[in-house]
Image (tube, helix red, strand yellow):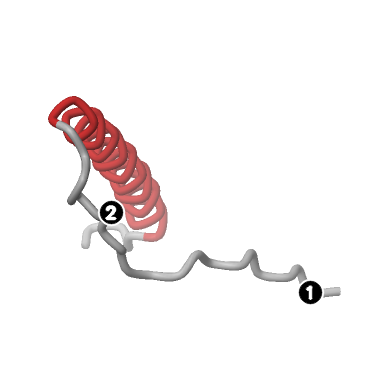
Amino acid sequence: MMEEERPRPTTGFTPAVLEGRDIEELRRYIVTLQAEIARAEAAIARKEAHRGAADAFFRKPGG
């Protein structure tokens, strides 16, 4: 039996409406976005490390 693929979230980004927000709300929004960027960068680093390990494992000797 084949394992089902996990559903992937939709790609793209819909920015929040900024009109009507006060300065503190905007600053909290920026902090939230920065945390999300850090999370995405960490995911990229994990995937690159995983790929690097796989490449090293399957690399031909002397190549």
Q: Position of residue 49 (x, y in %)?
A: 33, 44
Separation of residues labelled 1 and 2 (CA atoms): 39 Å
Which residue is depicted at the point 50% across and 64% down? Answer: 9
Q: Residue at x 18, y 25 (%)?
A: 24
Question: Where is mark 2, residue-wise?
Answer: 16
User: Front-most of 33 and 42?
Assistant: 33
37 on left or right of 53: left
Taking the view exactly as shown, the residue that stands out farthest to the right is 1
Left or right: 27, with 56 as reference point: left
- Residue farthest front in this picture: 20
* Residue 18 percent across, percent down from the top left: 19, 49
Q: Quadrant of residue 15?
A: bottom left
Please determine whether, in this image, residue 14 is positioned above or below residue 54.
below
**How dense is the environment of label 1, judged by Cα within 10 Å: few (below 14), some, or many (20 and up)?**
few
Q: Quadrant of the C terminus?
A: bottom left
Camera-nearest label, 1 or 2: 2
Q: Position of residue 13 (x, y in %)?
A: 30, 63
Is 4 placed left or right of 52 in the picture?
right
Compared to residue 16, the image places residue 28 above or below, namely: above
Callout 1 amino acid: Met
Name the foreground residue: 53 vs 35: 35
Q: Label 2's element?
A: loop
Give the residue drawn at x 32%, y 63%: 60
Q: Nearer the viewer, residue 63 or 2?
A: 2
At a point 37% along the width and 50% down the height, the residue shown is 47
Q: Which residue is under mark 1?
A: 2
Quadrant including the N terminus: bottom right
Residue at the extreme bottom: 2
Amino acid type at image mark 2: Ala
